[in-house]
Image (tube, rainbow, N blue to C red):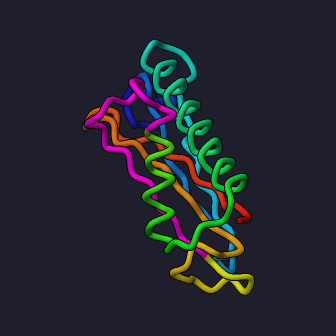
Amino acid sequence: EGMGPGAQPRSEVGEGAHVVIEASDRLGHTSVCRTLFLQASGPGSVGLAAMYLGLVEALHTAMARVNTEPPKEETAAELQKRVEGMVRETLGDAIGKDSKLRVMLVARDAFGEKIESARCSLAYVRASLLLDEAKGAIAVGDTFVL
């Protein structure tokens, strides 16, 4: 139990414990964000995992819609707002109207330079959902070709 010689290290992970990791390549052209769950059992973990899977599906569904619709003349900020609306629509009652859902979009040209137009080659899109103070947040992000 103690910290003296021969003590066995102990770590306890609370129910629903998770960590959000975000990374990009050396040049910053492509990025990814994932929520990793540190405990795979318990009602809190199952509920968070289901919510995370819903967030993943909603983000990818929104970006599939963006890629199949005719291109629009819009800024990256306008596209970000549109994607957030699509994600919110897909999640519906699962998150509620007053949820703290945020979508961030960074548009880049073919050279990896950040641009303001939504007519870009690559877009890093991250959706995050702030839960409550005890549970923190979950997030997912990917780089999409537009």
The image shows residue 24, relative to residue 22, as above or below, that is below
Is residue 90 one of those drawn in magenta? yes
Q: Is residue 45 visible?
A: yes
Picture quarter containing residue 28? bottom right
Q: Tell me which residue sits at (68%, 60%) in the image.
A: 70
* Occupied quadrant, residue 117: bottom right
Q: Position of residue 74 (x, y in %)?
A: 52, 72
Residue 112 vertical position relative to residue 140 in the rendered view, above or below: below
Out of 104 and 18, give the one closest to the viewer: 104
Q: Residue at x 48, y 61 (%)?
A: 80
Q: Residue at x 49, y 28 (%)?
A: 51
| Image quadrant in which the C terminus is located | bottom right
Q: Quadrant of residue 73?
A: bottom right
Q: Which residues are magenta?
A: 89-107
Residue 24 locus on image (x, y percent): 64, 68
- Up-down: is 68 above or below 88? below
Can residue 7 be seen in the rendering of this structure?
Answer: no
In the image, what residue occupies the spot 66% across and 65% down? 71
Q: Is residue 85 magenta?
A: no
Q: Nearer the viewer, residue 77 or 44?
A: 77
Where's residue 114, x and y in %? 57, 82
Quadrant of the drawing holding the N terminus: top left
Residue 5 vs 62, above or below: the answer is: above
